[in-house]
Image (tube, rainbow, N blue to C red):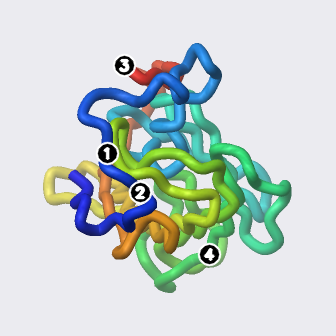
């Protein structure tokens, strides 16, 4: 849970139940499902190369698709997904050797653990009934792959959100995904405030 002591006075007191009416899906504004929350909801993620310089991440929770640009980003931002610029953070990790679609097993290593910095997001909430974040928030994600002794592979997504308007300290979350060999269980579902 987000510690309210890490929020600025502008954030106000979080509501006790649900999202206020102004953010209901009927109003076309499910703010609690904004970008910083999609990796925290239960669900699946599918990551593929869109082209030589762009990764595409599809989330079945909230039916979101994000693009991670290596180099100059495309688009203006201002929507729920914002603008995401990617880079390889730690050279030589196993993530660059072809797993989770994040490397080319027959080509040269592409770098290391994936770091994604997202800016220009539409304002929303960090929790369903909690502290807001502004359109000036910055979200930094680290995607790290780990092999565990039983032979499974895990993708750990660690997320940091900073926002000088509403947060006095960074807001951190982490979520893990287990690699599957097929699309079994892929079931995109829309955003909901319930």
Element class at badge 4: strand
User: Looking at the picture, does residue 39 appear above or below residue 149?
Assistant: above
Q: Quadrant of the C terminus?
A: top left
Counting from the top left corner in percent of width and height, residue 88 is at 57, 77
Q: Nearer the viewer, residue 11 or 68?
A: 11
- Residue 87's tag is 4
Q: CA distance from mark 4 to mark 3?
A: 36 Å
Q: Earlier in the sequence, mark 4 or mark 2?
A: 2
Question: On the image, which quarter does residue 111 sit in?
Answer: bottom right
**Marks 4, 3: nearer the viewer:** 3
- Residue 1's tag is none
**Marks 2, 3: nearer the viewer:** 2
Q: CA distance from mark 4 to mark 2?
A: 32 Å
Residue drawn at x 69%, y 51% as measured from the top left: 67
Instruction: Residue under label 2, please give it.
Output: 11
Counting from the top left corner in percent of width and height, residue 92 is at 47, 83
Q: CA distance from mark 3 to mark 1?
A: 17 Å
Element class at badge 2: helix
Element class at badge 3: loop
Q: Nearer the viewer, residue 27 or 32?
A: 27
Q: CA distance from mark 2 to mark 1?
A: 8 Å
């Amino acid at each position: 849970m987000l510690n309210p002591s890490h929020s600025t006075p502008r954030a106000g007191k979080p509501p006790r139940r649900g999202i206020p009416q102004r953010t209901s899906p009927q109003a076309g504004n499910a703010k609690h499902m904004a970008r910083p929350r999609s990796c925290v909801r239960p669900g699946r993620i599918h990551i593929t190369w869109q082209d030589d310089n762009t990764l595409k991440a599809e989330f079945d929770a909230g039916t979101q698709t994000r693009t991670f640009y290596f180099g100059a980003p495309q688009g203006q931002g201002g929507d729920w997904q914002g603008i995401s610029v990617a880079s390889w953070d730690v050279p030589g990790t196993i993530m660059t050797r072809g797993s989770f679609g994040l490397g080319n097993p027959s080509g040269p290593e592409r770098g290391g653990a994936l770091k994604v910095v997202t800016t220009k997001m539409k304002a929303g909430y960090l929790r369903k009934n909690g502290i807001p974040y502004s359109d000036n928030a910055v979200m930094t994600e680290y995607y790290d792959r780990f092999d565990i002794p039983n032979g499974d592979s895990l993708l750990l997504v660690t997320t940091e959100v900073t926002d000088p308007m509403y947060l006095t300290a960074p807001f951190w979350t982490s979520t893990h995904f287990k690699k599957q060999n097929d699309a079994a269980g892929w079931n995109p579902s829309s955003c909901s405030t319930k």
